[in-house]
Every structure is written in C-alpha cells, then in structure tokens.
Amino acid sequence: MRWILLAVIAAVAGIVGVNFGWQWVLAPLLAAALLRWLLTSLRALVHDAKQLDDDQATPAAPVSSDERTLFWCEECGTEVLLLIRGTDRAPSHCGQRMNERTEILS
Ligand SMILES: [Zn+2]
C-alpha cells in the first residue's frame, strides 16, 4: 500500500515537474526537509531540558575521596575534574556530551 502511494506521489511530482518546472517539486521537498530537521532539533532541546529538570531534583553531593572522576572531550581533548556531582548527566563540550572516566585511587 505504501509503495503504491509513493509511486502515485512520484508520478504526480514528475508530471508537475515536466509541465510547470522542477522548482514546484523541489521547493516543497526542501521545505519539508527543513521543517522536519527543525522539529527534530526542537524536540531534542525539549527532551534535554526535561531531563535537566529531573536531574536537578537530586541534591549535589561531593565526590568520594576514594575515586577521581574525569570528563574528557572526544573532539578537542579537554579534561574536567569532577569535584561536586550535581547531576548524573555528563557536561557538554564542543557541542557533544563529554565521556566519563572514573579512576580508583589507592
Ligand atoms: Zn571540546
């Protein structure tokens, strides 16, 4: 059923493109792609904000002295030493989440 619908849409797009110009086919496709990208980005932002609200419910706690927690950025190599854990989420750097590394001190 889905293939038939796609074939019909492709045929209509081909007829419109040949008779009226391809800008009438490509412009709506571009608009749909941009709208989809925009909605996906906004959804990710809202999801991150909700997760942040949930994480802030937990109180901040100092890290135990038996271990050392570092966050490192895969993109540029920056390392951050964790002193007080406020949330379970890793901090962001260079537009992405940093990787967590915990070292046990002897
Ligand atoms: Zn970075």
Image: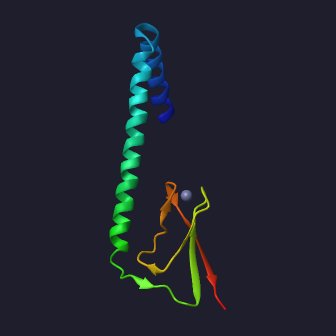
- Pinpoint residue 51: horizontal percent, then vertical percent: 38, 66
- Pinpoint residue 62: horizontal percent, then vertical percent: 45, 86
Can see residue 1? no
Indicate the quadrant where residue 39 lies: top left
Which quarter of the rendering shows the C terminus?
A: bottom right
- Pinpoint residue 104: horizontal percent, then vertical percent: 64, 86
Q: Quadrant of ligand 1?
A: bottom right
Looking at the image, residue 10 sits to the left or right of residue 78; the answer is left
**Colour scheme employed for the rendering of this structure:** rainbow
| Residue sitting at x 64%, y 88% | 105
Looking at the image, residue 25 sits to the left or right of residue 3; the answer is left
Label total for image: 0
| Residue sitting at x 43%, y 34% | 33
Indicate the quadrant where residue 81 lies: bottom right
- Is residue 106 placed above or below 46 in the rendered structure? below
Between 84 and 1, the residue placed more toward the observer is 84
| Residue sitting at x 45%, y 79% | 85
- Pinpoint residue 55: horizontal percent, then vertical percent: 38, 73
Can see residue 64? yes
Indicate the quadrant where residue 72 lies: bottom right
- Is residue 81 placed above or below 50 in the rendered structure? below
User: In the current view of this chain or complex, which residue is farthest to the right?
Assistant: 106
Between 25 and 77, the residue placed more toward the observer is 77
- Is residue 9 placed above or below 96 in the rendered structure? above
| Residue sitting at x 54%, y 90% | 65
- Is residue 57 placed above or below 40 in the rendered structure? below
User: In the current view of this chain or complex, which residue is farthest to the top?
Assistant: 19
